[in-house]
Image: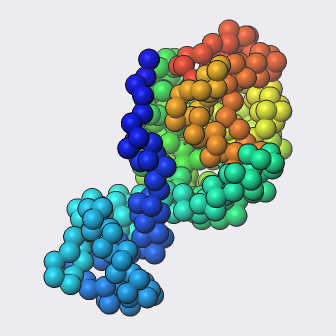
């Protein structure tokens, strides 16, 4: 049994001031303004276009949060801020925090959403701001490079297959799969705007001869093929139950006999109360997408079965399911 919360922990859970302080500093690109050498509040205000006395309060709070240092009147970046929050750094992750900030107002409408059942958005921020979407995918690609090889090894492919990475984003999985299986070839299918980033990451990995890019809308356009393995990684939670069922059935028709479809997503358990992170993610999807949802593993298994797949199995609890085409 999990232990009881203390009063202090309940207060901590309801406390978001520091979150918004960090998000605002990243949105103002304050850490980049401090790149290099320490500066006074006046100098920073001049660089980012801010009201100096107000900015000073923010700078001081960031010192208390240990993201900045202060000596005399001068502020500087902490080593972690210099590494991850300065735009010019190769390890910058600010795009992801800017995304959280862009979704802030939608979270503010959670009460109304719960009362009425009406969602506050009609389009996901990636549709209204494709550049931000692409920047976020690039960050996720950099920090998520370990999960791809692990999944590739777990699937135990024979090695010579043709892979379809549907909604493959930056190509993180296609690249990892090709690195694990030197004879594998892959197609990354995604929206044309996203594939501009994929072209870069595939080139950086030196895999242009083995990874093809196919632009299109997976709900509307033909997917090419036939393929031996299709992967749907983190795409189904943006769509409705019905669209997912239709898409799974569509992929079936693009697979060769003996092929398989692997779905990796953030599934809820049967009770809907775990994994803990996914229960919060389900609320995030509720307020930030027009029609997405977090589904249960059983839902994905039913899409596979209805789509014609056999030997439908859960390979990793609340994370990966697979079906075979006979
Ligand atoms: C969360 S990302 C997942 C990327 C990748 N599969 C991964 O696991 O890293 C969702 C991807 O689905 C793509 N996408 C969304 N709707 C799409 C559609 N209708 N047709 C093709 N791609 C789509 C987005 O462009 C984005 O690259």
Residue 98 horizontal/vertical position (percent): 51, 63
Q: Quadrant of residue 229?
A: top right
Q: Which residue shows up at 60% across the image and 16% down it?
A: 314
57 to 304, vertically: above or below: below
Q: Quadrant of residue 120?
A: bottom right
Horizontally, residue 101 falls left or right of residue 66, namely right
9 to 162, vertically: above or below: below
Quarter placement of the N terminus: top left
Residue 203 in sight = no
288 to 322, vertically: above or below: below
Q: Quadrant of ligand 1?
A: top right
Q: Which residue shows up at 57% across the image and 40% down it?
A: 280
Residue 25 horizontal/vertical position (percent): 42, 70
Which one is in front, 215 or 13? 13
Q: Quadrant of residue 82?
A: bottom left
Residue 177 horizontal/vertical position (percent): 49, 32
Q: Residue furthest front?
A: 7
Q: How many marks?
A: 0
Q: Which residue shows up at 47% across the image and 69% down it?
A: 24
Horizontally, residue 121 falls left or right of residue 272, namely right
Residue 99 horizontal/vertical position (percent): 55, 59
Residue 24 in sight = yes
Q: Which residue shows up at 27% across the image and 59% down it?
A: 80
Horizontally, residue 211 falls left or right of residue 55, namely right
Quarter placement of the C terminus: top right
Which one is in front, 100 or 219? 100
276 to 238, vertically: above or below: above
Colour scheme in the image?
rainbow
């Amino acid at each position: 049994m999990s232990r009881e919360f203390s009063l202090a922990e309940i207060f901590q859970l309801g406390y978001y001031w520091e979150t918004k302080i960090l998000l605002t500093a990243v949105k103002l690109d304050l850490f980049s303004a401090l790149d290099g050498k320490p500066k006074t509040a006046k100098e920073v205000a001049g660089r980012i276009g801010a009201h100096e006395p107000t900015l000073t309060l923010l700078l001081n709070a960031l010192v208390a949060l240990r993201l900045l240092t202060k000596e005399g009147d001068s502020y500087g970046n902490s080593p972690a801020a210099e590494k991850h929050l300065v735009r010019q750094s190769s390890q910058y992750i600010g795009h992801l925090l800017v995304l959280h900030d862009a979704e802030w107002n939608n979270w503010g409408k959670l009460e109304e959403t719960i009362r009425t059942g009406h969602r506050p958005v009609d389009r996901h921020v990636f549709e209204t701001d494709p550049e931000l979407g692409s920047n976020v995918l690039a960050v996720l690609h950099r920090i998520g490079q370990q999960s791809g090889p692990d999944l590739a090894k777990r699937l135990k492919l024979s090695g010579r297959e043709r892979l379809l990475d549907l909604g493959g984003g930056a190509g993180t999985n296609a690249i990892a799969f090709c690195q694990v299986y030197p004879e594998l070839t892959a197609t990354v299918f995604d929206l044309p705007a996203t594939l501009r980033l994929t072209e870069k990451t595939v080139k950086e990995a030196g895999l242009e001869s083995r990874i093809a890019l196919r632009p299109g809308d997976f709900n509307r356009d033909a997917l090419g093929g036939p393929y031996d393995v299709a992967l749907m990684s983190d795409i189904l939670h943006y769509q409705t139950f019905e669209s997912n069922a239709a898409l799974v059935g569509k992929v079936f028709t693009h697979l060769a006999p003996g092929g398989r479809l692997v779905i990796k997503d953030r599934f809820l358990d049967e009770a809907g109360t775990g994994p803990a992170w996914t229960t919060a993610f389900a609320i995030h999807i509720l307020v930030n997408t027009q029609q997405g949802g977090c589904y249960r593993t059983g839902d994905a298994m039913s899409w596979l079965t209805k789509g014609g797949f056999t030997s439908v199995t859960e390979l990793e609890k609340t994370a990966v399911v697979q079906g075979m085409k006979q």
